[in-house]
Image (spheres, rainbow, N blue to C red):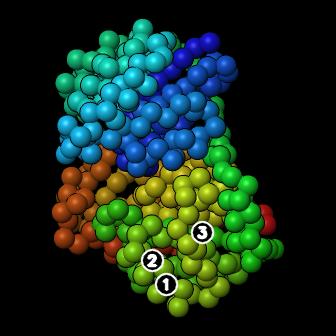
């Protein structure tokens, strides 16, 4: 039996981008063991993946702040990490921290990014087999390319991208209870939030778009939130839009399973969008300071609107260099609801599931 370790510890959306690698390994070696090193905030998401055997939790921030008091915990992690001798260790993070974790792990082949693409060059000190993804591909294909190049596999990997994250019976009943309220209706999940304001639509534009969509589809909206500020936003939105329900914050796996049961997910470049990309549900997403071609879910059922810089100054291959500092965020925040709806109508045939 082949044993593989994935080292990918970063932001939650980035973890989901690696899911095609897990699917590829499982298709190539059906009986393989796949373990994953991840920071604690992403552990529940990784643990819910049906193909991941062991989730190894690292807490680097905590350990740095309280080194001496965390020694027992750190030694336990090291023991767990080194309990298996892996056939391949894939460092898909590419920074110095992940390099140290790769160094600690026991394995015959340590694989990662080559010089032209590695996020932090010291990472190359800890890998032996290094590869550059082809330029211009979706981020999911970048990670997949590293692994396929290592196996000298040039055949395109055909993957629907759909998985069923593991949930309990009680959580399944929670989903059914929520859906009982909207049976026999078109249901659209709306996820307006993002970690960065400059990745969000203006409130007015989103409200206008949803009103137009509601009039066109006669649908029911499930309004999702991930922070207190987002909750206040969707509560205001609920007051302005007909047939809308604000849903309590859900665990990642439960949210994903709920997404798989609705007709459409509307989202920004954020965790919910990438999570929706692991289902068969169509998505309509809005991008501004990040590139839809790079980050949007793959497939014709996933449609995205790319905002443009009104100043004509910023071009980028991944993210705008002033994403966090741009005072206006005009590339997305000046998009109107009317323009959004017009673009949606152009993609409607691929953005509708039957009730």
Image position of 9 with respect to 155: above or below: below
In the rendered image, the quadrant that contains the C terminus is bottom right
**Residue 189, numbered circle:** 3
CB contact under 8 Å: marks 1 and 3 = no
CB contact under 8 Å: marks 2 and 1 = yes
Q: Secondary structure at mark 1?
A: helix
Label located before the other in sequence (1 or 3): 3
The image position of residue 322, as x and y in percent, is 20, 57
The image position of residue 252, as x and y in percent, is 54, 55
**Residue 327, numbered circle:** none
x 62%, y 33%: residue: 51
- In-image side of 243 versus 116 (left or right): right
Residue tagged 1: 235
Task: State whether residue 151 appears in this view.
Answer: yes
| Mark whose residue sits in front, 2 or 3 | 2
Residue farthest toward the bottom in the current orientation of the protein? 239
Task: State whether residue 344 appears in this view.
Answer: no
Separation (CA) of disc 2 from disc 3: 15 Å
Label located before the other in sequence (2 or 3): 3
Q: Secondary structure at mark 2?
A: helix
x 40%, y 49%: residue: 41
Query: Residue 193 is drawn in which quadrant?
Result: bottom left
In the rendered image, the quadrant that contains the N terminus is top right
Image position of 94 with respect to 255: above or below: above
x 55%, y 58%: residue: 251
Q: Nearer the viewer, residue 201 or 127?
A: 127
Q: Nearer the viewer, residue 253 or 327?
A: 253
Q: Nearer the viewer, residue 142 or 64?
A: 64
Q: Residues within 10 Å of mark 1 (few under 14, many from 20)?
A: some
Q: How many marks?
A: 3
| Mark whose residue sits in front, 1 or 3 | 1
Residue tagged 2: 231
């Amino acid at each position: 039996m082949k044993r593989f370790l994935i080292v990918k510890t970063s932001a939650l959306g980035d973890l989901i981008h690696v899911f095609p690698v897990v699917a590829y390994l499982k298709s190539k070696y059906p009986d393989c063991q796949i373990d994953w090193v991840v920071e604690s905030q992403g552990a529940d998401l990784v643990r819910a993946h049906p193909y991941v055997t062991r989730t190894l939790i690292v807490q680097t921030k905590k350990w740095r702040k309280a080194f001496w008091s965390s020694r027992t915990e750190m030694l336990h992690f090291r023991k767990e990490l080194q309990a298996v001798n892996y056939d391949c260790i894939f460092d898909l993070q590419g920074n110095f921290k992940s390099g140290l974790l790769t160094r600690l792990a026991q394995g015959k082949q340590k694989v990662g990014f080559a010089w032209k693409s590695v996020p932090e060059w010291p990472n190359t000190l800890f890998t032996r087999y290094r590869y550059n993804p082809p330029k211009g591909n979706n981020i999911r294909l970048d990670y997949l390319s590293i692994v396929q190049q290592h196996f000298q596999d040039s055949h395109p990997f055909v993957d629907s991208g759909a998985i069923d994250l593991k949930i309990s019976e009680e959580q399944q009943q929670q989903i059914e209870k929520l859906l009982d309220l909207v049976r026999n209706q078109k249901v659209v999940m709306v996820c307006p939030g993002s970690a960065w304001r400059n990745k969000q639509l203006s409130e007015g534009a989103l409200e206008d778009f949803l009103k137009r969509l509601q009039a066109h589809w006669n649908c029911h909206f499930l309004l999702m939130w991930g922070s207190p500020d987002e909750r206040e936003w969707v509560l205001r939105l609920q007051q302005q839009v007909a047939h809308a329900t604000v849903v309590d914050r859900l665990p990642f796996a439960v949210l994903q399973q709920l997404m798989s049961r609705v007709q459409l997910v509307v989202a920004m470049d954020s965790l919910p969008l990438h999570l929706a990309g692991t289902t068969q549900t169509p998505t309509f997403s809005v991008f501004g300071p990040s590139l839809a071609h790079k980050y949007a879910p793959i497939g014709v059922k996933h449609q995205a609107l790319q905002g443009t810089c009104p100043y004509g100054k910023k071009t980028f291959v991944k993210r705008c260099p002033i994403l966090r500092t741009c005072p206006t965020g005009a590339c997305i925040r000046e998009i109107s609801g009317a323009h959004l709806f017009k673009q949606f109508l152009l993609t409607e045939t691929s953005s509708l599931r039957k009730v």
